[in-house]
Amino acid sequence: MDYLKVIAFTHKHTDLKDLGKLIISDDLLETRLQTIKAKFDILEICYISTCNRVEFVFTTSEVVDHVYVTNFIRSFDFAIPEERLEEFSKQASIYENVEAFNHLLRVSCSLESLVVGEKEIFAQVRKSYEMCREVGCTGDYLRVVMNHVVKTAKEVYTLTNIARKPISVVSLAYRKLKELHMPANARILIIGAGETNKNLSKYLQKQTFSNFAIFNRTRAKAELLAKELNAEVFGLEDLKNYKRGFDIIITCTGATQPIITEEVYQSLLNGESGSKVIVDLAVPNDTCQKVLANNPIYFIGVNSLQEVAKRNLRERHHELIHAERIIDQNIQKFKPILKRREIERAMSEVPEKIKEIKKLAMDSIFAEDIQTLDDSSREVLRKVVNYMEKKYISIPMVMAKEILAKNS
């Protein structure tokens, strides 16, 4: 791992708006990376970009410091003013050799994520590597490194509980709803068309729920969500006049006062009886306390979900020690693997070198002597040389493997 380097810009030290300046579009990826490879004499490079980080993983024997990073970033021709380049470079975290490998493992296992245990980072790292591999920017070294990164991440997510319990309020709300076993044709009123309701509705859509009505102050915003859900759109003021009934209300708006008042709720019921479900993810709640007190309602509120989310997050952090132990074990396992691969690559040149020596000997150095031999003698010589060639190729390979096995 002597030449493995990582330059990382993350949420820890860089503003998210500034991270956006380091984004490379897919259509420019090959050109940009190949230019950097040529300019900095880099053999292999991988560019990783997620919502909270931009990282460059590459191989070089050069010393990577903040001066190097400044020149490195400048050469990408990002939309960063010259006077800010030095400031940018100081925001970078630089990792080398084993530390670089350890960092890659921690990133892929979500230990460095804004939210510990979010498995999306694993898929993002794999996708980033595959894109760089497909455009010819990585080679055998990073292939071996990334294979072990993937192996380690799978172990962490399988053998620990770091990603088991959800900490997203939306996913927790969905799980609560799922436990109720509501029919697929349940009538669902969605109040508010922001990101929270949008994300929750996607969960519901995957579970074949299809009977949606959307209420929002801004119709244009609601229509985008309605198109995805094949739902009808209403203005928020239409809520008190809606008479088609409902089974579930999902609400999350920015209102400072309750939207679902007792009067509105009774109007929505339109004479129906029986228990209903309200999922209220707004802060403060969109549902009036009187509604909850006076009616049979299964209430899923943001406050209770947030408590569960905090508890689950604490449990995830308890799993860190197990995840880090798996990472440490895999770093130790990887050292002989990488050493073996380095020797295999070096030994792969042996056959060609021996063939070159044989050709030089037979066709040049001893050519005149060979010509003095009769046909039978030349044939014997050819068999002896071919036999020696095979042995000179195989014996060093076997010896190298035995040495590696003994040392590991």
Image: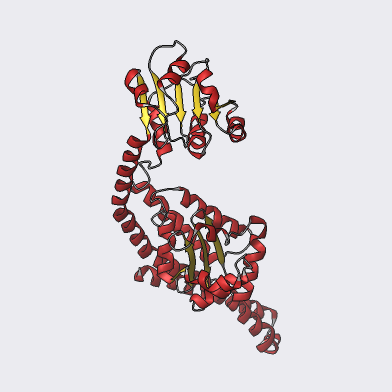
Res 393 visible = no
Question: Can you say whether 338 is above or below 291 in the image?
Answer: below
Q: Which sits in the foreground, 154 or 30?
A: 30
Question: Can you say whether 246 is above or below 404 in the image?
Answer: above
Q: Would you identify the image quadrant in which residue 282 lies?
A: top left
Q: Given the current orientation, which residue lies at the most extreme top position?
A: 271
Q: Which sits in the foreground, 5 or 175?
A: 175
The quarter of the picture where the C terminus appears is bottom left
Q: Which residue is located at x 41 percent, y 41 percent?
A: 168
Question: Can you say whether 280 is above or below 91 in the image?
Answer: above
Q: Which residue is located at x 55 percent, y 77 percent?
A: 388
How far from the left and from the top, in percent, is residue 398?
45, 70
Question: Can you say whether 299 is above or below 266 in the image?
Answer: below
How far from the left and from the top, in percent, is residue 153?
42, 53
Q: Which sits in the foreground, 131 or 50?
A: 50
Q: Which residue is located at x 46 percent, y 30 percent?
A: 251
How far from the left and from the top, in percent, is residue 277?
40, 23
